[in-house]
Amino acid sequence: MPFRKLQNRPAPDEKTHLGPRALIDAVNGYIKAQEGKTQLESTPRYLRLVVKSIEQAIHAKENGNFYAVHSTEFPIELLWPLGITPLLNELYGTLIGLVGNCEQQSVTVADDTGLPRGNCLHYRSFYDMAEAGAWPAPDFAAWSSSPRDPATKRQAMAAKCMEVPSFGLDRPYKILTPQGMDYFVREHRALVRFLEAQTGREMDCDYLKEVTQLSFRATQVYREINELRGKVPCPLPAEASFAPMAVYGAWAGTQTCVDFLEQLRDELQDRVDRGIGAVPDERFRCTCATSLPFLDCGIMAQAEKRYGAVNVMDHLQWWRDDPDWLIDPDDPVASLAYRVQFAASDALYGTATDYVEQLRQAAVQCRADGVIHFCSPDSRHAAAGHRTVKDAIEHSLGLPWAAIDCDSSARSRTSFDGVMAQLDAFFESVEKSRSYQERKRLTGLRPAAGRAMA
């Protein structure tokens, strides 16, 4: 597949850009290095499934299938019945943060072309790698619109750069309204027509119904996992915080997804039954207003060791109450359109009022002591709105709030020690807060004086 190269730019280096083969090798090396060190058996399992999703994508054509790159909040269930292998670009970018140093040459290409830093590294690296010729060339690209305007534009530009067809689902601003739903269903039906035209295949409706049922089952198990995260002590350690999101994002609509989530749920349930928490002495419980820091998964692991702090929910994995999105088993396309609006992180696409309410519900149900916002300058939507959300959470719940300045994906502009210093101040404020003191009085929590430095 031809790529448009930047003038005078050298050919891409697999290791410099962490192309698919190098990335797979790096993840496999990470898994091997973690052998015998993880709390959960599910931790290496989810990483292997992520590797498998990349393997399937880059070998799709050899297996007689098509391959599409797609964004989050996208109904990949529509791809499987047409023989299309999906690859989630944000997941690919997250892995670079997990096993790479995020200093790859590819993340500088957008700067060289004069493109603004208006969105997170996931989308920047996608375009950068496509421009440099390092991204595995898909048959087509697809995405769902986002409040981060450059996210949509960058993916459209990447598709144009790779000279492949593309389709963008136009998501309504006011979600879960009759007018919004009718519009989004029409968008999904247009997507089906696009996919059929690109593949020359007709949608297998019976197969799609099966896929949709599997996705709905995965949703139910995912919510059970979230409920277990809210138990005291929290059974889910930082090492597997991304596991449900990563597997659902890559495998929704498959038995593989259901099986993994059920295994993770059962493992967490066993820990709850035996009173095993992510840390031996749980002292602080926090939710994340956007996402955990992808740039270095060691940040939350260090928070466990240093403060006895656990993450009981992050907003990218919070599902609305009673997400019975399978509204019509005989109309899977309409049901999936509903699912995309009901899914985790969907409030990021709507009004600030809705966003605040979802954060409030998560904090209450998971019994949080405070809320952390890892505030990336490259995410205009989240960065611009954090003061509104902060005021609402502090006024309605009386919980401490911290906006941690960091780029959630790139280490080049983020200091690990700098982030930990900000967390030092946050947990000190939590311990002094009236809400925490009251909970400590009622539950007999031991004071967290003299934090244990790792």
Image (cartoon, grey):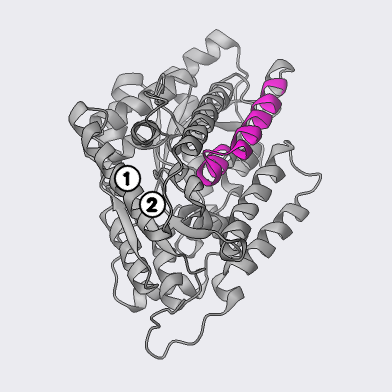
Which residue corresponds to the image point at 47% horizontal and 45% vertical from the top-left?
A: 422
**What segment carries the magenta color?**
244-270
How far apart marks 2 and 1 lie (CA) works out to 8 Å
The image's mark for residue 253 is none
Q: Is residue 49 visible?
A: yes
Q: Is residue 278 visible?
A: no
In x, y percent, where is residue 436?
48, 20
Relative to 154, is 344 on the left or the right?
right
In x, y percent, where is residue 218?
54, 30
Which residue corresponds to the image point at 45% horizontal and 28% vertical from the top-left?
A: 370
The image's mark for residue 382 is 1
Furthest-bottom residue in view?
8
Check disc 1 and give the amino acid type.
Ala
The image's mark for residue 376 is 2
Check disc 2 and give the amino acid type.
Ser
Query: Quick one: 422 or 394, which is closer to the camera?
Result: 394
Furthest-right residue in view?
36
| Local SS, label 2 | loop
For disc 1, the neighbor class at 10 Å (few under 14, some 14 to 19, many from 20) is many
Q: Quadrant of the C terminus?
A: top right
Q: Classify 181 as above or below 297.
A: above
The answer to if 313 sits in the magenta stretch is no
